[in-house]
Image (cartoon, helix red, strand yellow):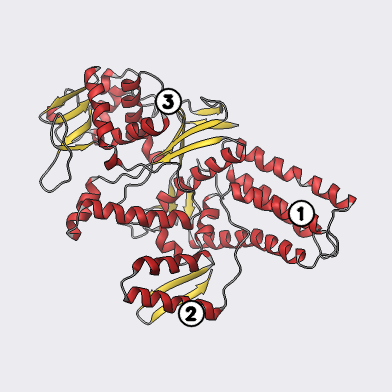
Amino acid sequence: MKLYNTLSKKKEEFVPLEEGKVRMYVCGPTVYNFIHIGNARPMIVFDTVRRYFEYKGYDVNYVSNFTDVDDKIIKKALEEGVSSDEISRRYIAECKKDMEGMNVKPATTHPLATEEIGGMIEMIRTLIEKGYAYEKNGTVYFRTRQFKDYGKLSHKNLDDLRSGERSLLVTGEDEKEDPLDFVLWKPKKEGEPSWESPWSDGRPGWHIECSEMSKKYLGEQIDIHAGGEDLVFPHHENEIAQSEAANGKEFAKYWLHNAFLNIDNRKMSKSLGNFRTVREISNQYDLQVLRFFMLGAHYRSPLNFSADLMEASKNGLERIVNAADHLKYLMENVQTEAMTEEETKAYGNTEAFVKAFESAMEDDFNTADAVAAVFDLVKFVNTTANAHSSKEYLQKLLERVVSLTDVLGLIVDRKEDLLDQEIEELIAERQAARKAKDFARADAIRDELLGKGIILKDTREGVQWKRA
């Protein structure tokens, strides 16, 4: 299995630190609002990577954090007149709903930054003791030049950064020994959440959070660290510096980064008015369609989101689902149970599609080619399965389709459709729950309907619904 390692800028053979096990850390979202489709790409991509490792028999310890203390969270809390904790917990719950809709498996551990402050303080203390960090007026900085390998991930030169990368500088730069030093701990401002530390009542810098959480739940060395390419510098570069300076050993062997996602060929931003949340997408499509769309391109290729591409993805996913449905329909009316000799030979031919699928995934997780292999399998299914097929043959074909699509996180063995009357009854129950302020039940009903392909839209005229 080959992975493209950002560290070496080439594909490398994957060799785990411990045979049969994968330790994997993926940077999670900062929870101050609904997640957008840019957040969704690494969630879907690296969930698929995890699923493939598990398909190959690896025991995967998958850690993905929630950053639940941050300037944006504090700003949102002040705007709403509530605590930062209330904002972060609300949007962690909303994020988990969206992840479930996209069929992203829960991580082995989802640590919260605010629950790991003690470990961060200890790591900062170690860095100070080793001469890699220093304190000035309650702020603790990391001595960037003290870490000789700084820049090895982003392939940036420190002197070039000094002259050209003004964006790296932070407030309080006049206190720093070097403008490139970055914050490990900062004193609180009025109205901000804070924690006691040896240096000041305050909170950790962003970068130290992931270093500590990765160490606590995966150990000092990990196999894979992943995230969006926007995190390569400075976030992941700073993680390497902190972790390797504190622990005295290589932090992560392989660094995987997904490329950006554009909308209608333009960068997604609120100022351009093309900012799309996953929740908004879920009002138009089953989120399985979004997942299928994301997997239609290689994770290191830029991806363009558009209505036309989503429609094409919806149609493509339906081709696979319909093939699975047809196999189930044929199984209800079979004449024979056991496979014939001819069917045994035909089934043996499906090994070629499995091999093509695995070859694509083992070449740096090329999901686009893996999806193409699934389509080839579907075409074979549609041309060889018929009313005269045996139950065993049909069952084995279905298992093969489900096996490969499950690696991609696609649910093709869908539930029975609800009758219109049942949908209306559930909508009425949801409205009653909302009136009674039982929002948990109301959300549960919405999620249940979405899981069965029913999309709700709340309007002034009432609730409208449609089948995905």
| Helix, strand or loop under label 2 | helix
Q: Nearer the viewer, residue 378 or 427?
A: 427
Name the mark nearer the viewer: 1 or 2. 2
Which residue is labeled 3 in the image?
A: 221
Q: Is residue 165 visible?
A: no
Q: Is residue 263 left or right of residue 52?
A: left
Q: Which kind of residue does numbered mark 3 sit on?
A: Gln
Q: Earlier in the sequence, mark 3 or mark 1?
A: 3
Q: Residue at x 45, y 65 (%)?
A: 447
Q: Which mark is residue 67?
A: none
Task: Find residue 396 and report its horizontal and vertical position in percent.
Answer: 75, 52
Q: Which kind of residue does numbered mark 1 sit on?
A: Phe
Task: For the N terminus, give its image quadrant.
Answer: top right
Name the mark nearer the viewer: 3 or 1. 3
Q: Which mark is residue 424?
A: 2
Query: Does 51 appear above or below 457?
Result: above
| Helix, strand or loop under label 1 | helix
| Helix, strand or loop under label 3 | loop
Name the quadrant containing residue 207: top left
* Image marks 2 and 3: residues in contact by CB distance under 8 Å: no
Q: Residue at x 48, y 79 (%)?
A: 425
Query: Does 119 appear above or below 411?
Result: above
Q: Residue furthest right?
A: 341
Name the quadrant containing residue 311: bottom right
Task: For the C terminus, give its image quadrant.
Answer: bottom right
Q: Earlier in the sequence, mark 1 or mark 2?
A: 1
Q: CA distance from mark 2 to mark 3?
A: 53 Å
Determine crowd level at label 1: few under 14, some 14-19, many 20+ residues with C-alpha closer than 10 A: some
Which residue is labeled 1 in the image?
A: 380
Task: Find residue 306 and report its horizontal and vertical position in percent.
Answer: 48, 59
Task: Find residue 70 and report its horizontal and vertical position in percent.
Answer: 24, 45
Q: Earlier in the sequence, mark 2 or mark 3?
A: 3
